């Protein structure tokens, strides 16, 4: 277990649900010694004007991100599959409710 | 295949935001760290002159407002510190640069808040100038900076309005109150005008910053816009801006204004303003006095981690 130094608290990413029925969305990040403090700080920093009804915090070190350098090849498989869209299929105008 | 530089410049050209993990020129990174951390420090130091009046606010309403405003400034500092960290500098380093005097913050906060009217003048003029600067930064080319600025701008508008309201109330009060209102405007006007930074021809970082679309307007363009707006707003207060050369120019469709005292500007930037030492000393004291809280929180977190591992 790594030691938490008093001068360098871990970084946390903050996700906020603004209304019931919506997704949690990334709002920003902050430093905190533990999860409880991260939640309370997130409330004070990111929801001073009723911006949220639910908060998730996760230590930034647990987020794995795709690399921008490899974005072109990484997302390449979706580039040439126009048949995944409804407009790809040519149907007569008289066909209704489809 | 295009080089890293070409891809970067092409994104800037096409208004595609740069994100932290994208390749960027070292100078772009440095320029941003400098500008964003200065901005963050300004929010934090900016709490001091206003905090000075929280216990003496003239009513409960004014007090609640001032507390909320100062709390916002703390939040704004934190948004910006987090955004700065995405560029690869630690929070600790950033704070150290402030406390050691290596990093600068906006000179405006090196002026004292002598009367209650100063809280009004700060809201109207200082936050007004800040908004003028910050709105175009919502379109800055670096994503995290632009996103932080959008949040800040949304919250900043109440700051300016509450300030104007304080001055408006004073301007309709007793002779003494009217005098206090004018006196605060007299003292804050020129420092606020100087908030836009040196004139374009002597602003070393401006050109690069505009080329990379961090800044969108030059210092002088924003300054002129600010003066034009304030010259009209001050009429609502029935007060005067302390500039005998301030005059509408039909030809340019702008206000002409008097000479800025650049000697005073550089003097304050270089550490010799009325409150430079006091502000830094207050920040250092807060940091040192808060050490036990940081230690206790770290010890508590370590203990909890430990007991959850045993379980």
Image (spheres, rainbow, N blue to C red):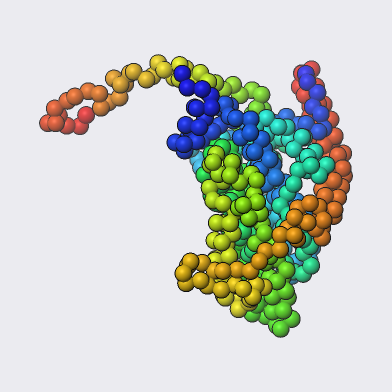
Question: Looking at the image, can residue B158 be seen?
Answer: no
Question: Extreme front residue here?
Answer: B201
A72 over B282 or under it: above or below = above
B246 over B40 or under it: above or below = below
The quadrant of the rendering that contains the C terminus of chain B is top right
Q: Name the foreground residue: B196 vs A32.
A: B196
Residue sitting at x 44%, y 36%: B14
Expressed as whole percent of the image width and height from the top left, the position of residue B109 reads: 74, 56
Question: Looking at the image, can residue A77 be seen?
Answer: yes
B136 over B50 or under it: above or below = above
Residue sitting at x 69%, y 75%: B182
- Is B140 left, or right, of B183 in this rendering? left
Expressed as whole percent of the image width and height from the top left, the position of residue B204 reads: 65, 45
Exactly how many numbered labels are in the figure? 0
Q: Name the foreground residue: B217 vs B20.
A: B217
The quadrant where residue B115 appears = bottom right
Residue sitting at x 64%, y 44%: B205
């Amino acid at each position: 277990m790594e030691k938490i130094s008093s001068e360098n608290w871990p970084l946390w990413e903050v996700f906020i649900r603004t209304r019931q029925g919506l997704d949690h969305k990334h709002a920003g990040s902050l430093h905190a010694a533990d999860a409880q403090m991260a939640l309370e700080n997130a409330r004070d920093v990111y929801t001073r004007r009723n911006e949220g009804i639910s908060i998730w915090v996760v230590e930034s070190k647990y987020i794995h991100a795709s690399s921008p350098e490899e974005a072109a090849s990484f997302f390449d498989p979706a580039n040439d599959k126009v048949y995944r869209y409804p407009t790809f299929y040519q149907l007569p105008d008289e066909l209704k409710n489809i | 295949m295009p080089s890293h530089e070409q891809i970067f410049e092409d994104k800037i050209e096409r208004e595609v935001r740069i994100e932290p993990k994208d390749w960027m020129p070292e100078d772009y990174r440095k320029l941003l760290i400098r500008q964003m951390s200065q901005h963050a420090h300004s929010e934090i130091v900016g709490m001091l002159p206003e905090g000075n009046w929280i216990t003496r606010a003239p009513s409960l309403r004014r007090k609640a407002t001032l507390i909320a405003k100062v709390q916002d400034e703390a939040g704004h500092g934190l948004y910006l510190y987090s955004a700065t960290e995405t560029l690869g500098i630690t929070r600790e380093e950033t704070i150290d640069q402030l406390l050691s005097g290596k990093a600068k913050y906006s000179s405006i906060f090196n002026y004292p808040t002598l009367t209650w009217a100063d809280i009004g003048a700060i809201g109207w003029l200082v936050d007004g100038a800040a908004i003028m600067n910050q709105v175009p930064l919502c379109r800055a080319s670096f994503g995290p900076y632009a996103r932080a600025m959008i949040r800040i701008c949304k919250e900043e508008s109440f700051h300016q309005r509450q300030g104007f309201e304080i001055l408006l109330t004073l301007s309709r009060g007793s002779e003494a109150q009217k005098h206090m209102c004018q006196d605060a405007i007299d003292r804050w006007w020129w420092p606020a005008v100087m908030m836009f930074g040196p004139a374009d021809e002597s602003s070393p970082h401006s050109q690069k910053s505009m080329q990379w679309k961090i800044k969108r307007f030059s210092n002088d363009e924003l300054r002129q816009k600010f003066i034009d707006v304030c010259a009209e707003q001050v009429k609502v207060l029935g007060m005067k801006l302390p500039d005998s050369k301030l005059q509408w120019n039909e030809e340019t469709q702008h206000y002409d204004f008097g000479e800025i005292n650049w000697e005073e500007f550089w003097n304050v930037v270089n550490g010799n303003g009325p409150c430079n030492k006091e502000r830094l000393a207050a920040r250092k004291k807060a940091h040192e006095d808060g050490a036990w809280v940081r230690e206790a929180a770290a010890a508590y977190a370590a203990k909890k981690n430990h007991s959850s591992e045993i379980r």
